[in-house]
Image (cartoon, rainbow, N blue to C red):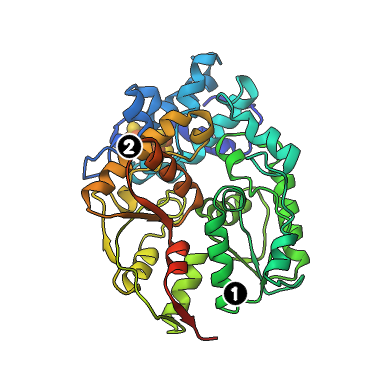
Amino acid sequence: MVEIDEKVMNKEVLEMAFDRCIKCSTCKYSYKNFEKSCPSGEKFLFESYWASGRIRIIRGVLNGELDWTDELIDPIFACTTCGACMDSCQAPHADYIVEMIETLRELAVQHIGPAKNQQFLVSRCEESCNPYGEPNSDNEDLKKKYNLPDKAEWVYFIGCTSNYRQQSLRDATLRFLKKAKIDFTLVDEHCCTSPMIRTGQLSIVKDYMNYNIAQIKNTGAKKVITSCAGCYKTLINDFERFGEEMGLEIYHSLELVKQLLDKKKLKFKSGYNKTVTYHDPCHLGRHMGIYELPREIYKQIPDLKLVEMKRNRNFSWCCGAGGGVKIGYPDWAIEISKERLEEAKETGATVITSTCPFCKTNLTDANEAYNFDFEVLDLMEILDKVEIEIEV
Ligand code: SF4
Ligand code: SF4
């Protein structure tokens, strides 16, 4: 075994590259279905762009067979971290493949830097606390607009994509929480750190996590709700992985909706007479195992006809935005979404919906770039369009 003296957060996942992968290639397709599942491998059609190849790269750079050259940048960073390979691989390291890739990126950032433009994720955060480089909103205006208190039981963690790119999703969530009379407030957020973790750029991650935890705890809240699949996964999984125990309950907004439906407190007073197909966000589906909850909600909305794409649930084709691909490889990101929209077209749906603002952004960009005529809407936006009554 090669002694790993590199500075990375989790050496154990790198060690798995030496003895766990049996090079069987099962990770290249959906297990059993043999559908295409890895956007990166399918695009570049070269071993190093599949999960198995990336594991060989880890081995190569650690045991000295591979030098750190710029030729490694694309094989290492052109991956959406969608987790389809984890779902297919049947070996004992399956659950850790994306963490292995993220840790390889952590190493690569120290030796050859991230892919083109991905460094802006950090520099923009350093300037204005969000990866879009927008002037930081401390959310005080929203607090005033929605008459929110300083202390509350819940914090709605908006997330950068909803706050700076998908404000209709943010506002739909705010209106839903008000209608449900949830005792909630907002905080001056820093980015949840997901984009930095996915691209191996960890310099500000711990500080940002600590800042967000302190902001939330200042409100006295015990529960955090978000309508972003990326924030949700990061707040639950990555904060713990980085040793930042929050001691808070974390919810995706759809979990609150489902609870209200189960308790028969949420009633629909009008319908949504459209054919809708649901795109599983990788961060909610494969990474967090939530597949049925959103479907159970859509099925209860009167008049809504839910149709499934051929690849759904754990077999879903990624939207193409994750893992730093949207900023590092923007044209390819929407090519991946194009394939998803073509699949959605086959269902006869006129609406493609998701539960993640980042998926919504990329699907919308592809919808426009390739002249599809879908309505791209989040679950919260659909709920905002129907008349609902919430008993409290
Ligand atoms: S990562 Fe898993 S599925 Fe892929 S080649 Fe290795 S053992 Fe096989
Ligand atoms: S995470 Fe997704 S894109 Fe990356 S290697 Fe695995 S299947 Fe391919």
Q: Do the residues labelled 2 and 1 touch (CB within 8 Å)?
A: no
Q: Nearer the viewer, mark 2 or mark 1?
A: 1
| Residue beneath the point at 27% across and 55% down | 349
> For the residues marked 2 and 1, what is the alpha-carbon distance in whole angstroms?
44 Å
Q: Mark 1 points at which residue?
A: 178
In this rendering, position of residue 348 left or right of residue 91: left
Where residue 120 sits in the image (x, y, percent)? 64, 31
The type of residue carrying mark 2 is Cys
Where residue 66 sits in the image (x, y, percent)? 50, 15
Compare residues 291 and 206 and report the one nearer the observer: 291
In this rendering, position of residue 95 left or right of residue 207: left
Compare residues 268 and 34 and report the one nearer the observer: 268
Q: Can residue 59 be seen in this view?
A: no
| Residue beneath the point at 56% across and 23% down | 116
| Residue beneath the point at 34% across and 65% down | 295
In this rendering, position of residue 221 left or right of residue 358: right
Figure label count: 2
- Some atom of ligand 1 lies within 8 Å of the CB belonging to the residue at label 2: yes
Q: Mark 2 points at which residue?
A: 27
**Quadrant housing residue 340:** top left
Task: For label 2, count other residues whose C-alpha is less than 10 Å away and answer few (under 14), some (14-19) or many (20+).
Answer: many
**Quadrant housing residue 313:** bottom left
| Residue beneath the point at 53% across and 50% down | 230
**Secondary structure under the numbered disc 2 in the rendered image:** helix
Above or below, 328 against 85 in this view is above
